[in-house]
Image (cartoon, rainbow, N blue to C red):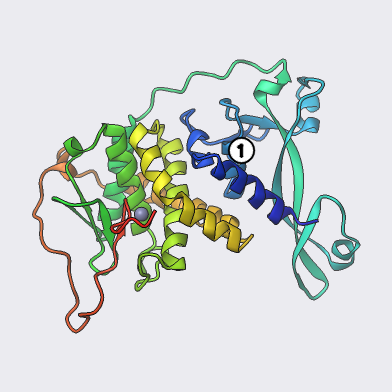
């Protein structure tokens, strides 16, 4: 059974409807989690659950529900998610409806297994979803993410032009917050650029330093940063602003191309997005607060993008929020 292709097809179908499906998924102020273990789902499962039309972030398998004394309503359709397990090679070769072998080494095989979960809203007897605990404001959490990266040497400069991350100078350039439609748009954009910055060689070493706009690497990095910033938005409780949705629409066709080309793409992007979220969260927790709360937002020096000498044919690579030369 080709689980990866089926999941990719579902995501493509949702994308073809016009809105990046994951954008509606993390509006509850937290990530989707298993209500029995309390653990958030990771990677692709966050994306799959985020695509469903449920606002409750809690999920259970049928068995878990029964064990907790709550009951999946008759006729409800569950959502299929996946997990990777290592099994005996012979067991993998026997195959099965709900599994796909990803690789074989020696007597062992890595298998992707599908299983079904139900949303709390499909289950009778669930306690109401507790109110989100008043914790840090989204703006404080976004600040902490930026501080965490600044602690590792990333620069944040404000000035005119499109928001972008410049890997060669390890620098995010942002317009002022007041130049955005809303503060949510500003913060979501900042998270997106932070997601790019996490890929610098001295951090998660994911970025292709010479990726050109329009290349497969560029599209892949954009999809990864997009998923990561949407997930981080969920982590910090940031509601998506209207112009974010608009901007994402500009990328949709390049993401669709990437997904149609390769059934592994969304899995790779989701796994990377998970790594980015973990990294940014860790850095944020250890971040040294800058003096003023909005210190990082003060107009800082602006300078021209760093161009390396002798590199005259190429523009400095920038992962811009909006494509610098929209082709859509
Ligand atoms: Zn970008």
Q: Secondary structure at mark 1?
A: helix
Q: Is residue 174 left or right of residue 244?
A: left
Query: Along the line of sight, which residue is nearer the eye, 86 or 189?
Result: 189
CB at mark 1 closer than 8 A to ligand 1? Answer: no
Query: Along the line of sight, which residue is nearer the eye, 174 or 206?
Result: 174
Residue at the image position 27 percent from the left and 39 percent from the top:
186
Quarter assignment of residue 40? top right
Q: How many marks?
A: 1
Residue 285, above or below 309: above
Residue 90: x and y in percent read 89, 66
Residue at the image position 26 percent from the left and 48 percent from the top:
147
Quarter assignment of residue 260? bottom right
Residue 303 in view in this figure: yes
Residue 46 in view in this figure: no
Q: Is residue 49 left or right of residue 295?
A: right
Quarter assignment of residue 110? bottom right
Residue 180: x and y in percent read 23, 37
Q: Residues within 10 Å of mark 1 (few under 14, many from 20)?
A: many
Residue 65: x and y in percent read 76, 27
Residue 23, above or below 216: above
Q: Determine the residue located farthest toward the bottom in the rendered image.
A: 310
Query: Along the line of sight, which residue is nearer the eye, 155 or 77?
Result: 77
Q: In the rendered view of the protein, which quadrant contains the N terminus? A: bottom right
- Which residue, given by chain and number where applicable, does mark 1 sit on? 49
Q: Determine the residue located farthest toward the front in the rendered image.
A: 328
Residue 136: x and y in percent read 34, 30
Residue at the image position 76 percent from the left and 57 percent from the top:
2
**Ligand 1 visible in quadrant:** bottom left
Q: Is residue 145 left or right of residue 63?
A: left
Query: Along the line of sight, which residue is nearer the eye, 287 or 206?
Result: 206
Residue 299, above or below 61: below
């Amino acid at each position: 059974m080709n689980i990866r292709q089926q999941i990719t097809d579902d995501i493509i179908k949702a994308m073809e409807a016009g809105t990046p499906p994951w954008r509606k998924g993390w509006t509850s102020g937290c990530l989707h989690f298993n209500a029995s273990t309390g653990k958030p789902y990771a990677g692709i499962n966050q994306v799959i659950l985020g695509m469903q039309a449920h606002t409750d972030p809690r999920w259970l398998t049928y068995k878990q529900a029964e064990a907790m004394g709550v009951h999946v309503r008759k006729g409800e359709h569950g959502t299929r998610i996946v997990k990777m397990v290592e099994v005996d090679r012979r067991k993998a070769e026997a195959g099965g409806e709900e599994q796909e072998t990803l690789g074989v080494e020696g007597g062992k095989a890595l298998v992707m297994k599908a299983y079904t979960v139900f949303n709390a809203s499909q289950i009778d007897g669930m306690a109401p979803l507790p109110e989100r605990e008043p914790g840090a404001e989204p703006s404080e959490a976004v600040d902490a993410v930026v501080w965490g990266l600044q602690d590792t040497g990333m620069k944040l400069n404000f000035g005119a032009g499109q928001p972008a991350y410049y890997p060669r100078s390890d620098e995010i350039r942002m317009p002022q917050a007041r130049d955005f439609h809303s503060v949510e748009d500003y913060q979501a954009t900042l998270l997106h650029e932070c997601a790019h910055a996490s890929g610098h060689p001295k951090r998660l070493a994911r970025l292709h330093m010479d990726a050109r706009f329009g290349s497969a690497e560029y599209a892949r990095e954009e999809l990864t940063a997009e998923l990561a910033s949407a997930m981080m938005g969920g982590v910090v409780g940031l509601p998506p602003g209207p112009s974010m949705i608009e901007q994402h629409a500009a990328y949709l066709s390049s993401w669709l191309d990437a997904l149609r080309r390769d059934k592994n793409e969304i899995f790779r992007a989701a796994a990377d997005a998970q790594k980015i979220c973990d990294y940014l969260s860790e850095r944020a927790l250890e971040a040294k607060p800058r003096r003023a709360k909005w210190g990082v937002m003060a107009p800082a020096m602006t300078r021209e993008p760093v161009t390396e000498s002798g590199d005259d044919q190429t523009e400095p690579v920038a992962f811009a929020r909006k494509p610098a030369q929209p082709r859509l």
